[in-house]
Image: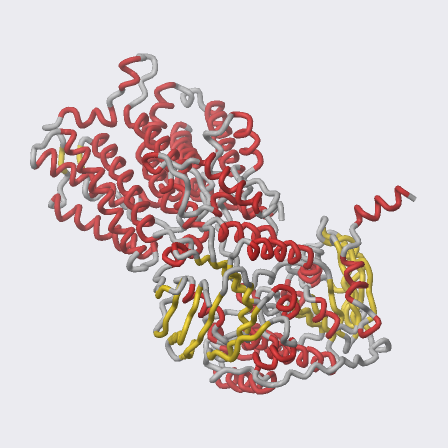
Amino acid sequence: MTSTTVDAPKSALSRIIATGTHQRVLAFASLIVLLIGFSIASPNFMQMSNMIAILQATSVNGVLAVAVTLVIITGGIDLSVGTMMTFCAVITGVVLTYAGMPLLLGVVAAIATGALAGSLSGTFVAKMKIPPFIATLGMMLILKGLSLVISGTRPIYFNDTPGFSEISRGSLIGNLIPALPIPNGVLILFMVAALTAYILNRTVLGRYCFALGSNEESVRLSGVNTDRWKIAIYALAGAIVGIAGLLIASRLNSAQPALGLGYELEAIAAVVIGGTSLSGGRGSILGSLIGALIMAVLTNGLRVLSVAQEWQTVVTGAIIILAVYADMMRRKKPN
Amino acid sequence: MSYLVEMKGIEKRFPGVHALKSVQFSLKPGEVHALMGENGAGKSTLMKIMSGIYARDGGEMFVDGKPVTPDSPRAAQDLGIGIIHQELSLMNDLTAAQNVLIGREPRRSLGRLDETALNKKTAEIFASLQLAMDPRTQVSTQTIARQQLIEIAKALSYNPRVLIMDEPTAALNDAEIAELFKVIERLKADGVGIVYISHRMDEIKRIADRVTILRDGAYIDTLDAADTPLSTIIQLMVGREVTQNAPVFPDTSQSPVALEVRNLSRGKDVRDVSFDVRKGEILGFAGLMGAGRTEVARIIFGADPRDAGEILVDGQPVNIRTPHAAVEAGIGYLSEDRKHFGLAVDMTVRANIAMANMDKFTNRAGVLDEAAMKRIAVKYIERLGIRTPSDMQDVRLLSGGNQQKVVIAKWLLRDCDVLIFDEPTRGIDVGAKSEIYALLEDLAAQGRAIIVISSELPEVMRLSHRIAVMCEGRLTGILPGGADTTQEDIMELATQRESALVGAEETQ
């Protein structure tokens, strides 16, 4: 499963069919069905502007889903990604707006803050042996509190840094091809996803994600420094969360310290819909990306159909249960 | 005298246990040195010290005559000491090659993996083992035996000079064991020293050069394997003589039938299986791994659905779809995997015995009656001779044999008339085995119908009044128990493959 994407076309195809990628295929098929269904139901749905709105709405949740996928594949969970995202945004606000540093430093600050917070979670989990659920629950609250403390509970605006909102809202592609005004936020999502997928499938770090989730004790007895790698994985996830922090701050042109709670559950939902196993050892970035898209398409489609927002939440919940049930049925069959 | 490894005066204490008391051990190049002892004798602890998983509390260890203290698995690997663990410890979601070279993946710059080199290197190791397997095979798709071979390949990839094998044959059938022994012979010829831990006595004679015996954490003796009769080894292991009386089977042919199974089928695993068990009878199930014996048991117990077939208890057809229904019908199943399915190992002996019978120990408000539970637990601890300091001891602290007795107590309490034992003595030492046998015979004598599934032929032959043999999901025959049936008779039925039969018919 780890090497389906980059192989020669023929063997890649046969292996996609042969190995456990059914859930991803299923998720992708559901996405297509949803797209077709909504475009039949409403002519407004398939407009270019609406498609771009969906992609834009996916960008933050998608990047968070990518981050949390890494941790979930190791058999862990990260509940802190939502408030960590906000924390990174607030730190960026401090660097850019309060300290008046150049834009690039703000970007570096967001990613570095995420990596640092992630490695702290990783240390709690790996060194202090605190279960990931508890460790990241603690981090979730710590970071939420710190965001409020540092910002004095007030939003930090980026009006003095004109380039900042371009990170998410500008469109490099649109400048080149005016007919395709895809915002940079979406471009960043796909770049982050591609890079992370590469790391997951092609590097030692990625290999140990799967290995840890599959049988941690065995990895340890093989002489691998599992603690160090686990911290590295949480740190990488944190760095990606930092990018999500930049995206949301740029989109809102402000760091909103009260925001963030609930984002972690949306991200985990996307990961689960995408077929990554919560018990670890199995999963893919592509799946999580599709999962995030499904959630955005659902929300958007139901809104276009004028379904009340309350119902959208109900539908999302049902989809999660259905997705996991379908996955379990598939796994049961061959035996 | 040139030893590869020498250990002297090794001490190890765990909270409340003196696990190793001044133990010595030595290994020469190119020898197979069997390490024998009952469960809890300290074999695995000693080997974990040798392979750097545990630190010793006292004593000395030498490799090539130089004092060493391996403080991690990696340090031991660097000294050339490799270990194959008792319980399979592979990463199921990874491929064979990814498992074999875990921690030593061929890398390119920036931590990128060189998958091609990884697979090539593993293919070379497989070739040296004469193992025909694609390195890209996902481990979870392989049989236990093939996984064991991957595990061995992994250990060999470190080019060890010392290889510790902890019960490598526990899950293998005879053909696979023969294959493993060939590998061991080749390693011996290359000068690798092998420490071999096994409970199967017959293997010691086949493979070992020397035998070291431990008992209760103490060193007993080191003997030449060829010159020492097995009975002597067993005697030294248990510290007393184990009587092996020739079994006398009661005549149960006139007893009423307790359980009858007709035309049971489930996919390819179980095909048209019919048999019956009478009250007071022990019916053995023999066959190779994957012959479908456990699958038959699980269907009867309602743990897996069936495609077709009937189950009759005391002559009455019963509709068993769930384990709950099976228990209601008086059928109990003791899984081969005690730790996963049979016991809550972190709970006490008392809680485990009461587990399946909570309704007997609760009042109308759902409050537990601890005093009643204690009475019953103490009663069964006495009756089955469970060796535990008290009924409040955690089950995980008991030896394998005593854990098995706790499972048996649990089911006896349910008053099941039909009891299915799946590998009842797996991982249990010689002394405790004969106690379990006596217990099974006792249960049969009380009029219960007993089914025993076992991969060890001597065990099936020792216990069974009749022996049912399976091959590839079919019941290929039922043989009488006792001296009239030989191992060869059973093996013939156990290898009666359908494909082979078809071929034979065509040529006629």
Q: Quadrant of residue B46?
A: bottom left
Q: Quadrant of residue B281?
A: bottom right
In this orientation, does residue B85 appear? Answer: no
Residue B291 placement (x, y as % from top left): 71, 56
- The colour scheme applied to this rendered structure is secondary structure
Q: For the point 23% across and 47% down, which residue is it?
A: A117
| Camera-side residue of B461 and B8 | B8
Q: Residue furthest front?
A: B1
Q: For the point 12% across and 27% down, which residue is it?
A: A161
Quadrant of the snapshot with the C terminus of chain B: top right
- Where A55 sits versus A265, above or below? above
Residue A174 placement (x, y as % from top left): 29, 16
- Where B272 sits versus A183, above or below? below
| Camera-side residue of A167 and B169 | B169
B264 sits left or right of B342 in the view = right
| Camera-side residue of A39 and A191 | A191
